[in-house]
Image (cartoon, rainbow, N blue to C red):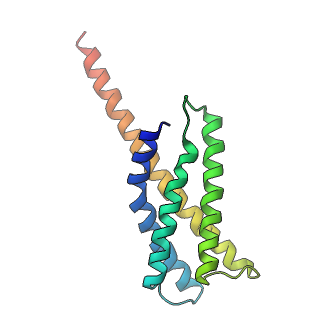
Amino acid sequence: MDVREICKLILTSFFIIFGCSIIAAQVFTTAMGLGPVCSVHINTIWVLTSLICLTHFVFYSKGKLTRRGMLIRTLIHFYITTALSIAAAIYLGWIVCHRPLQVIVFVVLVATVYLTLFGISEYRHKKTADELNQRLGELFKGD
């Protein structure tokens, strides 16, 4: 991916990540009996979402990425995202490290948000590719 594609990815994914994070935070805090998400939490989630979006630069490459290279970068991105999210959750007092269930549930929610965004992104890419293939088919059909 070049810088332009990454910047476009950052802008398009920010609000999806933010929205999914708010929903996941509400589910987590309710499930763990921590009360509702308040404005302090939302501000922290806003900052966290911004940091997570900036980590999309992990995907920067001057050349074409192989499937293996993309998988490795996706895993690195997931681990960075999870680490940032856990740090924010500890800061907000949502999880305590000596309570493994809290950490496990939180990581599952982070993975759910990550997979949701990944699924939306893949769907959009496939839709764009299908549209381009259809246009190419129509263009060459006339020859």
Q: Nearer the viewer, residue 105 or 64?
A: 64
Spot the residue most to the top: 143
Taking the image as shown, residue 17 lies to the left or right of residue 31, namely left
Q: Residue at x 65, y 50 (%)?
A: 76
Residue 33, quarter of picture: bottom right
Residue 67, quarter of picture: top right
Taking the image as shown, residue 104 lies to the left or right of residue 62, namely right
Q: Residue at x 63, y 63 (%)?
A: 82
Q: Residue at x 36, y 37 (%)?
A: 128
Q: Position of residue 91 (x, y in %)?
A: 61, 79
Taking the image as shown, residue 24 lies to the left or right of residue 107, namely left
Looking at the rendering, in which quadrant would you find the C terminus?
Answer: top left
Residue 105, quarter of picture: bottom right
Q: Position of residue 20 (x, y in %)?
A: 45, 67
Q: Nearer the viewer, residue 115 or 55?
A: 55
* Image: 64 above or below 111: above
